[in-house]
Image: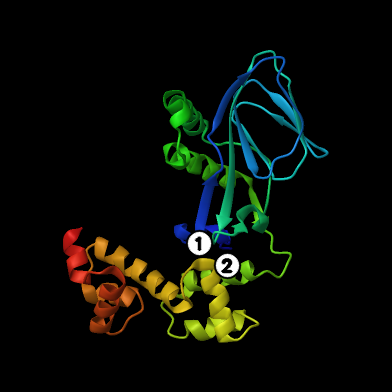
Amino acid sequence: MKQKIPFFKTIPYRNIILDLTQAPYPQENGDDWDICNRTMNDYDLFICESGSACFVIEEERFNIKPGMALLVPPNHMINAYKTSDEPVRMVAQHFMLYLFHKTDFFGHIRYKKLVTFSDLNLVFMICREIRRIIEQREDFWTPLDTNPLFMVLLNTFIEEAYEAEDFSEERKSYLVLQMISAIEKDYTNPDLLENLMKISSFGYSHTANIFKAYTGLSLKSFIIERKLEAAKGRLLKGDNVRESAEAAGYDDEFYFSRIFKKYTGTTPRDFRKRV
């Protein structure tokens, strides 16, 4: 049986927004270290490099060891203390992860708060690089300095922590996610718009307004951009314009070329020559 692809793997990157609310916090803590009755208004990911500690989130207890990561959700009471003889060496990062600029990503999944990374070499290498950057930049840190590195760590954490989708409430964001998933699977289908409307309990205009409010694009523009992404992929592989048009679901090569230029500023042939 084919395994279902998690919804977030079908979302275009522009609709997943990482907001680093402050600089990463590399730390090495001795016996006097603890966290006492603290709450935060964002997520905090703790990645353990050495030593060990016990975290209590609300009433849940977690023992974090080297190669493990713990995600503390917003507005949860946290207490923690060192449990190893050696110092606890960790990198912590406050952040928010949004779908469509406004929806909490983790609100749409069930996940494990504590995971053990499979690729320890990658994780430890990134933690070392983050430490190096923070030491060099000191007070001149900007999110661009460590955002790409942390995104790799966060993506790795999500891969390990993900258990299932969680759409227990009827939310507009869920409707948009369903529509994006359907577009991803069926963007070449000439009946796609009609099929999308079967997903929604609203009329076309209201559905289209909801879609644009969350993604920043009209429904038709979103579909066209997905088609053109497919076409660009084929052009990059060396396919001709006709083959690329067919891959994007266009029967008319000349109409495809007009749409391509309108949205990209260049013709398919010129795009292919450039790359």
> Which corner quadrant holds the N terminus?
bottom right
- Camera sees residue 5: no
Task: Classify 200 as above or below 214.
Answer: below
The circle drawn on residue 11 is 1
Task: Classify 113 as above or below 270.
Answer: above
Applied colour scheme: rainbow
Residue depicted at x 57% and y 55%: 98
Residue depicted at x 59% and y 59%: 102
Q: How many marks?
A: 2
- Camera sees residue 102: yes
Give amino acid for label 2.
Leu
Q: Outermost residue, right direction?
A: 59
Task: Classify 62 as above or below 171.
Answer: above
Determine contact: label 2, label 1, CB under 8 Å. Answer: yes
Q: Nearer the viewer, residue 68 or 14?
A: 14
Residue 28 x/y as whole percent: 60, 19
Q: Nearer the viewer, residue 228 or 101?
A: 101
Residue matched to label 2: 177
Residue depicted at x 17% and y 67%: 270
Of the two numbered discs 2 and 1 on the same chain, state the one appearing first in sequence. 1
The circle drawn on residue 158 is none
Q: Nearer the viewer, residue 126 or 75?
A: 75
In the image, taking residue 30 as reference, residue 23 lies left or right, namely left
Q: What element does badge 1 sit on?
A: loop
Mark 2: few, some, or many residues within 10 Å (few <14, many ≥20)? some
Mark 1: few, some, or many residues within 10 Å (few <14, many ≥20)? some
